[in-house]
Image (spheres, rainbow, N blue to C red):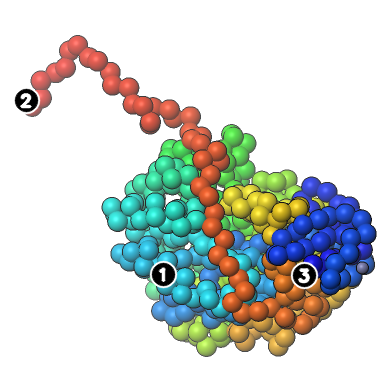
Amino acid sequence: MTKVIRNGTIVTADRTWKADVLMQHGKIVAIGSNLHGDHEFDATGCYVMPGGIDPHTHLEMPFMGTYSADDFESGTRAALSGGTTMVVDFCLPAPKQSLLEALQMWDNKTSKAACDYSFHMAVTWWGKQVFDEMATVVDRGITSFKHFMAYKGALMVDDDEMYASFQRCADLGALPLVHAENGDVVAALSQKLLAAGNNGPEGHAYSRPPEVEGEATNRAIMIADMAGVPLYVVHVSCEQAHEAIRRARQKGMRVFGEPLIQHLTLDESEYFNKDWDHAARRVMSPPFRNKLHQDSLWAGLQAGSLQVVATDHCSFTTQQKRNGVGDFTKIPNGTGGLEDRLPVLWTTGVNTGRLTMNEFVAVTSTNIAKILNMYPKKGAIVEGADADILVWDPKRKKTITSKKQQSVIDYNVFEGFEVTGLPRFVFSRGELSIEEAEVKAKVGHGEFVAREPNAAVNRALSTWKEISAPRKVERTGIPATGV
Ligand code: URP
Ligand code: ZN
Ligand code: ZN
Ligand code: ZN
């Protein structure tokens, strides 16, 4: 059985042209004029783009004494509803837990996935077991490892652990990721704020100023350089972090930066809302910033110094957020966004002229497919690619409201936001998953996407050549030890 998308305009990361797209057995099999198939979908007035890829989600994740509320069912339905056809979720071993045991836990959750998915593996502790298991994880097709520089006493790794893990990534052809915030400083500032009675959600923002993110980003970049490995910085929220990434890239380093749709569009004033729930629902790390930082992130997307827009979808109900009444450090960190990323980015990026349509495709899909080494299976409209296709109607409008969302939580940080630009059809490996507002996605349709290591991208970048071949100086007069 064949399906064809007719009369649309194809928009990819590098060009825009009018053509029909024919799908069969989950793949794109032809692109051209006047194609016909068993089922035909009219894309008149629409753009036909590679489905979105969200490389940063936390579905049903044990975190801060609870579990994130959306699982692989509601999370992937939300993704598809908003035009995202693949998510990359974080497999998170508890400290001292085997990576393979954690992977088994994550595998068990994904039987409900409605769209394709992959994993990043988190390195939350260090030892011979982790060193060894990383190779098995790579063999399983998971070739990216996340490091938390924050969440002291829980997930945080120290510099020695991070350096060891980065070197291991270099050996394995894997890509290290960092959550870059200085966890020691955050912990100290948090204690200071709490001691002064500043225990509301605004304390969360005060405890994580841009400097803690800038410092950690610089540190991670330098450690990556010494380990001879590229680096991907998740949820870049501020100019200080962006500046570090820009500088590194200018020197020729492969450092990638991922702003979130939330940081691009929501600002720190949210934490000063009089309503405790309103503020706590927006507690995430790093926190929302002011307009100057937002401008920096937009500039980075335009100039190419930042490459990917993600969500860090990690949703908690209001009830869960209330765990932190009286102590902001206990408010579960995280916000949702899976369903809203594309419509909000189109509305605030493309409709305002800040991004071209091709740049939109690059930052929502193609760039991350390349960075994570799954292009052109994903992130492309070419013959042979997976038929993960978004038929985008630039004229469809809606007002975002939690009352109509797929996410199971009881609010939406974009509540009331009017978007222009929404999916008409979404195909997941050729299956019609969304037809306008109707969700046809099938629970369990999603498949794991294995990724190869990428030796070329991971070639050593450091100019500190001595590190791999230290030169011992032959000396003639060596003084005697002792006195
Ligand atoms: O606040 C956040 N970002 N929660 C999810 C976990 C993480 O740090 O990415
Ligand atoms: Zn026909
Ligand atoms: Zn993080
Ligand atoms: Zn995250």
Whether residue 238 can be seen here: no
The quarter of the image holding the N terminus is bottom right
Q: Position of residue 202 (x, y in %)?
A: 55, 73
**Which label belongs to residue 1?**
3
Select label 1 or label 3 by which is in front: 3
Q: Residue furthest front?
A: 1
Callout 1, which amino acid?
A: Gln
**Which label belongs to residue 339?**
none
Mark 2 → mark 1, Cα distance in angstroms = 59 Å
Give the answer, above or below, for where 455 lies relative to 345. Answer: above
Give the answer, above or below, for where 102 lies relative to 29. Answer: below
Q: Position of residue 363 (x, y in %)?
A: 70, 55
The residue that mark 2 highlights is 483
Q: Residue at x 10, y 20 (%)?
A: 480
Callout 3, which amino acid?
A: Met
Give the answer, above or below, for where 483 lies relative to 297. Answer: above
Give the answer, above or below, for where 369 lies relative to 479. Answer: below
Q: Residues within 10 Å of mark 3 (few under 14, many from 20)?
A: few
Image-based side of 114 in relation to 439, left or right: left
Image-based side of 395 in relation to 65, left or right: right
Q: Residue at x 53, y 44 (%)?
A: 454
The residue that mark 1 highlights is 104
